[in-house]
Each structure stands twice: as structure tokens, then as C-alpha cells.
Amino acid sequence: MASLSLHLSLLELINKNYSSLKITIMKGNEKLIVVLNSLLAEELTAINQYMVHSEMCENWGYGKLHKAIRKQAMDEMFHAKWLIERIIFLEGAPTVSKLNPMKIGKTVLEMINNDNDDELNAVKEYNEAIKLGREVQDQGSVDLFTKILKMEEGHVDWAEKQRAQVEQMGLENYLNAQTENSAS
Ligand SMILES: [Fe+2]
Ligand SMILES: [Fe+2]
């Protein structure tokens, strides 16, 4: 009887240690996984918004804008892929079915302004995610957020350049320069 109870308490001890070991090694921080999934929803939304904007520009004959916006859609695809990889690595479940409301512009200027707002928001959110990653001591996630943040800053920069050009040369001249046949 004594040996049976010793055996049982040994089993309990092993189980207890194993489960705490599992939590330490395998699980990513739950709050961080929620943030990773929320960023993923934004990236998936951005991919769709940029694909629509890019195709609208193609349809209007603005080949240069079509290519530039399509390149950004591809960047966002990489961001989504990296976030999914990270969530899986942290043993969370990536949610790929959630999209946020899309902000499709009706004109080129509206598109650029909408995309600029979204990119500024992305910069803010990745900065917040970096802060959380540091708090929960997840350097791998901090590194990923930092890599994406720099690309989002590049997207903001691109949108700001377009807005500056529209302001300086006028919308007509700007759009004229966006056709494939234009010199610039
Ligand atoms: Fe992104
Ligand atoms: Fe972006």
C-alpha cells in the first residue's frame, strides 16, 4: 500500500513538472498571440485593399501606380506569412478568416489617402506590439515586429511622396506621369 501511494505521488510529481515545463517551453504569451492575430487580420485586409486599388489603377491605365501598389500588396503578403509562422511557432492558432472593413478609394487620391491612414495605423500598432513583446520577453517576436515596422514605414513614406507630388505638380500632371508611356 505504501509503495502504491509512493508510486502515485511520484506520478503526480512527474505530471506536475511536465505540465509546467510544457507551458514554459511551448506556449507563447496568450496576450501576444491575440496581438499577432489582430495584426494578421490587418495584413490580410491590407492585401485585399491593395489588390483592389492596384487593379483599379490598371483599369484606368495608370500602369506605374498599378505596379507600385501591387508591390505593396506583396509586402503585406509576406507580413501575413511571417505572422502566421510566428503564431504557429508559439503554438497559437492563426485566424485567417477575419478581415477588417476595407477602405476602397473611389479616386487615386482617395486610395493614397486611405492607404496612408492605414499605414500610419500599422506603424503605431507594430510599435505597440514591440513594447508588448519586450514586456513578455519574447525577443523573436520583437525582431519580427521590428522588421515589419521598417517596411510599414517605407509604405508611409511612399504614400507621403505621392501626396507631395500631387500637391506640387497638381493632380493632372501627377496622373499623367503614372501612365506606362510617361517619361518619368
Ligand atoms: Fe504590413
Ligand atoms: Fe504596409
Image (cartoon, rainbow, N blue to C red):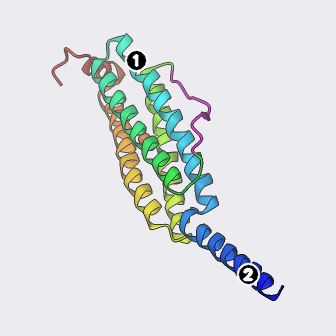
Most frequent secondary structure within the magenta stretch = loop
Separation of marks 1 and 2 at Cα, in angstroms: 68 Å
Q: Secondary structure at mark 2?
A: helix
Q: Looking at the picture, which amino acid does disc 1 mark?
A: Glu
Q: Considering only vertical position in the picture, is 78 above or below 50?
A: below
Residue range in magenta is: 94-105
Image side of residue 19 versus residue 90, left or right: right
Residue 36, how many percent across, how many down?
Answer: 55, 51
* Mark found first going from the N terminus, 1 or 2: 2
Residue 8 percent coordinates (x, y) = 76, 78
Left or right placement of residue 86 versus residue 54 in this view? right
Residue indicated by mark 1:
55
Which residue is drawn at the image coordinates 30% and 25% (left, top)?
A: 67
At mark 1, the secondary structure is helix
Q: Residue at x 31, y 32 (%)?
A: 165
Q: Quadrant of ligand 2?
A: top left
Q: Is residue 118 above or below residue 170?
A: below
Name the residue carrying label 2: 7
Name the residue rendered at 40%, 32% in the picture: 73
Q: Determine the residue positioned at 49% across, 62% down.
A: 130
